[in-house]
Image (spheres, rainbow, N blue to C red):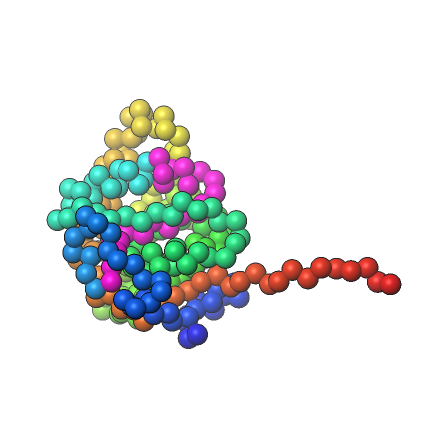
Amino acid sequence: SDVCSSDLPYLICERRTFGAGSPHSRQPFPGIRDMDEGYHHDLFISYPRGGYARDWVHNHLKPVLSARLLDELPNEPALFIDEQIDVGSDWPLELANALQRSRCMVAVWNPPYFRSKWCLAELGTMRERESSTGFRTAENPAGLVYPIVFGDGTTFPDDVRRIQQKTDFKELAYPYVQFRDSQKYLDFHDKVGDLARDIAQLLARVPPWDSQWPQVRPAPHPPFAPRFPRL
């Protein structure tokens, strides 16, 4: 394993090969064009699996963003969104593979996001890719992570609060399906349209895929040590 800048005790950084001969590799999905150089997904949606953010992502963000990207990209967009629930279990290899094969990330930020080992691993992996490919520098301030602020941002870690390119959806963070019938849904639709245009510009700048990109993953849970009564 290599040492990465993500040095939190519950995250581990390593380099894993996702080449054609790797047992973790996949063939490109049918119907997806121009997914060359190892990419399978245009966009990886990273979000906390519990609470209102999950319902908001599934009920509103994913379907509207998918439709708006159809108007911005030359090919049908390929979005990856994980359906599994983060219950503190080991990070699935399928999730790690999908992230490694994604061109960029939309991260839905709220306080629970930064308490989730899975979310931090997803964010850390993509930020390590930014560092290794020359993004987020004075010469190239753009990044491969596009943050969405879903909840209170005053408690976010200092290093992510400094990211300038992000969109605030706090006033449109209604998880319920009835939100679609409200006047505010038109504002939501317009804001997601702006997001889709930004993502289209971001996708035009992604680096060629590299099987050696570092991957940050949650540290495994320590084995359970049963307590026995003293005799």
Locate residue 165, reporting x and y percent.
29, 54
Quarter occupied by the C terminus = bottom right
| Residues rendered magenta in the picture | 38-59
Instruction: Please identify the quadrant where the N terminus is shown.
Output: bottom left
Count of numbered marks? 0
In terms of image quadrants, where is residue 191?
Answer: top left
Q: Is residue 129 left or right of residue 85?
A: left
Left-right relation of 135 to 54:
left
Tell me if I can see residue 196 in this picture.
yes
* The quadrant where residue 98 appears: bottom left
Q: Tell me residue 35's x, y (percent).
A: 20, 57
Q: Is residue 1 left or right of residue 205?
A: right
Name, please, the residue furthest toward the left: 74
User: Residue at coordinates 36% horizontally, 38% vertically from top-left?
Assistant: 58
Q: Nearer the viewer, residue 82 or 186?
A: 82
Instruction: Determine the residue positioned at 43% across, 69% down.
Output: 13
Along the line of sight, the residue nearer the viewer: 95 or 139: 95
Asked whether residue 41 is drawn in magenta, I would say: yes
The residue at the far right in this view is 231
At which x and y percent is residue 130? 30, 65
Position of 78 relative to 188 (above/below) = below
Residue 213 makes an appearance in the image: no
- Residue most extreme to the bottom: 2
Q: Residue at x 38, y 33 (%)?
A: 174
- The residue shown at (28%, 35%) is 188
Side of 160 where 79 appears, left or right: left
Q: In the picture shown, does residue 55 fall above or below 24?
A: above
> Residue 24 at x, y = what percent?
35, 62
- Residue 68 located within the stretch drawn in magenta: no
